[in-house]
Amino acid sequence: MLLFFQILITMFIAEMGDKTQLLMIAMNSRYKLRDILIGSAASILVLNAIAVGLGALLSQFIPTWLIKIIAACAFFYFAWTTLRKVEEGEEKETIRDSKFPILTVFGTFFIAELGDKTQLTAITFAANEGSESAILVWLACSMGLFAADLIGMMVGHLIESKMPAGFLDKLAFVIFAFFGVTTMRDGVCLLTAGWIPWAVTGGAAAVFAILCVCTWRKHQNIRQK
């Protein structure tokens, strides 16, 4: 039991302030709280199962740099669609309500957390404790991770209910865009060093900024008409 709480507290502390906790805040602008709870909980259980059982093996088949670049593109996409939601208004429900919101939350959380420090922590605990403690490590890691991200969900829900309309959407745009840039840089840094990662990241950020400006100007022209 002591080991269980040691792992749980370690995972909780490791996740506090991490990008996935901030993503839980941002997702409140896009999905219902129920969908976020179910999608993130399922993703956490699967991620920690991979970390405990197949984490070391997985890294041999899926390069970390590729995971991070895919995640960066996903963050940019969510930032852009959030901007569209802000510009088009609440009547544009198709942006907020996808056909499979739980699967979308699951996939976003999964990609963001895959290879993160909390998953590496789970792999370390599993390696240290051995296969006989695999289930205990899996449950403790999952509960610690979910407890920390639950705080992010509650903060996002509170912001949405207490702050002015549209505030959480703007915050979500900033969060998604920030993680798009930083995750892209981290991914390219795993491939090469020097000025190239900064150049690629700057280019990706510039393309994203141009797309956002075009989207903003398009809707401004529509409003003027």
Image (cartoon, rainbow, N blue to C red):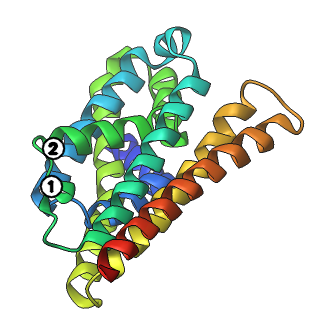
Residue 90 position, x and y percent, is 17, 73
In the shown orientation, is residue 139 left or right of residue 22? Answer: left
Residue nearest the observer in this picture, 201 or 217: 217
Name the residue tied to disc 1. 94
Query: In percent of the image, x 18 and y 37: which residue is there?
Result: 103
Numbered circle sitting on residue 102: 2
Q: What amino acid type is highlighted by mark number 2?
A: Ile
SS for callout 1: helix
Query: Can you say which quadrant of the picture contains the N terminus?
Result: top left
Along the line of sight, the residue nearer the viewer: 217 or 35: 217
Q: How crowded is mark 1: few (under 14 residues within 10 Å), some or many (20 or more)?
A: few
Residue type at numbered disc 1 = Thr
Image coords of residue 101 (percent x, y): 15, 46
Residue at 64%, 33% (x, y): give it: 187
Other-residue count near label 2 (Cα within 10 Å), few / some / many at <14 / 14–19 / ≥20 = many
**Circles 2 and 1 in contact, beta carbons < 8 Å:** no
- Name the side, left or right, on which 114 lies relative to 160: right
